[in-house]
Amino acid sequence: MDTSTGTTASPAVSSAESSATSFSHVREGDTEFESGGLRDFFLYRDLGIAAATGGQVVAHLVKANMAPEVGTGWHRHEANFHIVYMLKGWARFMYGDKETLVKAGDCVHQRPGIVHFLFDYSEDMEYLEIVSPAAFTSIDMPAPCAVPAPTPWT
């Protein structure tokens, strides 16, 4: 921080990086929640980041669309960076043999290659997911352990 001005210097951005990206401002209502994403029991709202970064990063909102029955199955992602920030409700994940409850306000960094299973979630679950690269892949994996049953919606 520059104490004379009270400002913090921004890291330098190369001209190649700045030309590969563009300014983006997606307002509420500009995009809608849609099916057709990675999981059919969730709805996805694109936040325009993949287009703005030339595919370097994707950011979308994900919300529950159907009650949990089978969950995501055991899988891992081919991604360099992956975070989930829970906005509403909760979700239960297995990370290897460890059960993890993620509630509104919680943030999870899923390290590259971590084997996981989202198996239960609340009816009002909604989270922000940010992944790099935007065209990340999911790879089914063998189950390292049993998974608890989901909680039925009432």
Image: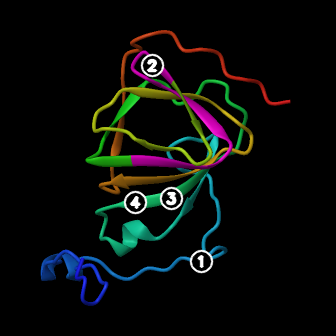
Q: Split into 4 quadrants, where in the image is the C terminus?
A: top right
Q: Position of residue 89 (x, y in %)?
A: 68, 43
Q: Position of residue 124 (x, y in %)?
A: 73, 45
Q: Are marks 2 and 3 in contact (CB under 8 Å)?
A: no
Q: Amino acid at mark 4?
A: Val
Q: Does residue 105 belong to the magenta stretch?
A: no
Q: Bounds of the magenta span?
A: 83-99
Q: Amino acid at mark 2?
A: Lys
* Image vertical order of residue 83 relative to residue 122, above or below: below
Using the image, tell me which numbered label, if any, was put on residue 58: 4
Q: Residues within 10 Å of mark 2 (few under 14, many from 20)?
A: few
Q: Marks 1 and 2, how far apart in space? A: 37 Å
Instruction: Find residue 12 and report its image quarter.
Output: bottom left
Q: Marks 3 and 4, how far apart in space? A: 7 Å
Q: Residues within 10 Å of mark 3 (few under 14, many from 20)?
A: some
Find disc 1 in the rendering and name its residue: 27
Find disc 2 in the rendering and name its residue: 98
Q: Position of residue 37 (x, y in %)?
A: 53, 50
Q: Earlier in the sequence, mark 1 or mark 2?
A: 1
Instruction: Find residue 51 and report its image quarter.
Output: bottom left
Q: Secondary structure at mark 2?
A: strand
Q: Secondary structure at mark 1?
A: loop
Q: Amino acid at mark 1?
A: Arg
Specify the farthest residue to the top: 146
Using the image, tell me which numbered label, if any, was put on residue 59: none
Given this view, does label 4 or label 2 mark the residue nearer the observer? Answer: 2
Q: Are marks 1 and 4 in contact (CB under 8 Å)?
A: no
Given this view, does label 2 or label 3 mark the residue nearer the observer? Answer: 2
Q: Earlier in the sequence, mark 2 or mark 3?
A: 3
